[in-house]
Amino acid sequence: WLGMSPRVGSLCSGFGGLDLGLAEHLGGADVAWHAEIDPHASRILNRHWPDVPNLGDLTTVDWSAVEPVDWLTAGYPCQPFSAAGRRKGTEDERNLWPYVAEAIRRIRPRRLLLENVAGHRSLGFDRVLGDLAEARYDASWVSVRASDVGAPHRRERVFIVGYPAGVGRHARRAE
C-alpha cells in the first residue's frame, strides 16, 4: 500500500468484526465508512469509530458520492442461506447480495473481504461468484469453523477474498 494505511469501506458492518480482523491482518487500516442500519450495532460502531460516517441503508446509497476505498468488507445477511432458516436464497427479502455487488461494481476496490454462513456454498454462492466475475473480479474462498481457532463451538463460516481479475491474490499494485 506504498507506506499508507489502506482505506476500508464496510457494508453490513455489524459490530465491525471484519474491519477489526482485516486491520489486524494488514498491520493497520483506516475505516473510511460503514453501512449499517441496526441501531445497537450502529452505536457500537460510533463508539469505536466516532469520526467514521455510517452511510446507513446500503440499498439507498448513491455510490457515486462515496469515497473510494482499497478494501471493501461485507458480512451480508446470512438468513437467506442458513441451514437454521427457510433457505429462500435469492427469493428472501433479506438477501442484500445484489446491493453489495452493485457497491463493488461502482466503487471498484482493490480487494474484497466477504463473509457468510457455510450453507451459502450450496445456495446462492454461484450467484456471488458469477456477479464477481461479471464485475471483473477473481475470488478465493475458505471455510473456517469457530472451533478451528479455539472457540468451543463449530459455527462454520465461508470467507471470500476478491481481487481484480488477472491481478492475483497476493499482488500489490500502485493505482
Image: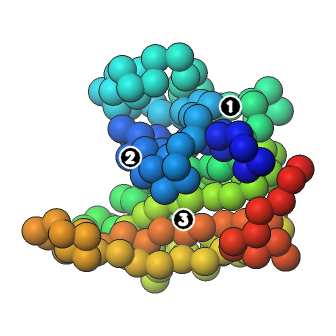
Q: Distance between the residues labelled 2 and 1?
A: 22 Å
Badge 3 crowding class, 10 Å Cα cut-off, few under 14, some 14 to 19, many 20 or more, is some
Relative height, residue 132 to residue 105 (above, below): below
Label 3 vs label 1: CA separation?
21 Å
Give the SS element for disc 3: helix
Q: How far is mark 2 from mark 3, CA to CA?
A: 25 Å
What amino acid is labelled 3 in the image? Thr
Q: Find disc 1 in the rendering and name its residue.
A: 61
**Residue at position x 59%, y 30% from top?**
33
Read off the residue under disc 3.
90
Given the current orientation, which residue lies at the most extreme top position?
Answer: 51
User: Residue at left 48%, top 33%?
Assistant: 36
* Residue 41: percent from left, percent from top: 34, 31
Q: Quadrant of residue 29?
A: top right
Query: Could you say which is closer to the camera, residue 125 or residue 92?
Result: 125
Tell me the kind of residue under disc 1. Val
Q: Is mark 1 on a helix, strand or loop?
A: loop
Residue at the far left in the pictured view: 152
- Give the residue displayed 66% in from the left and 43% down from the top: 6
Residue 17's disc number: 2
Give the mark nearest the N terminus, 2 or 3: 2
Regarding residue 94, the answer to whether it shows in the image is no
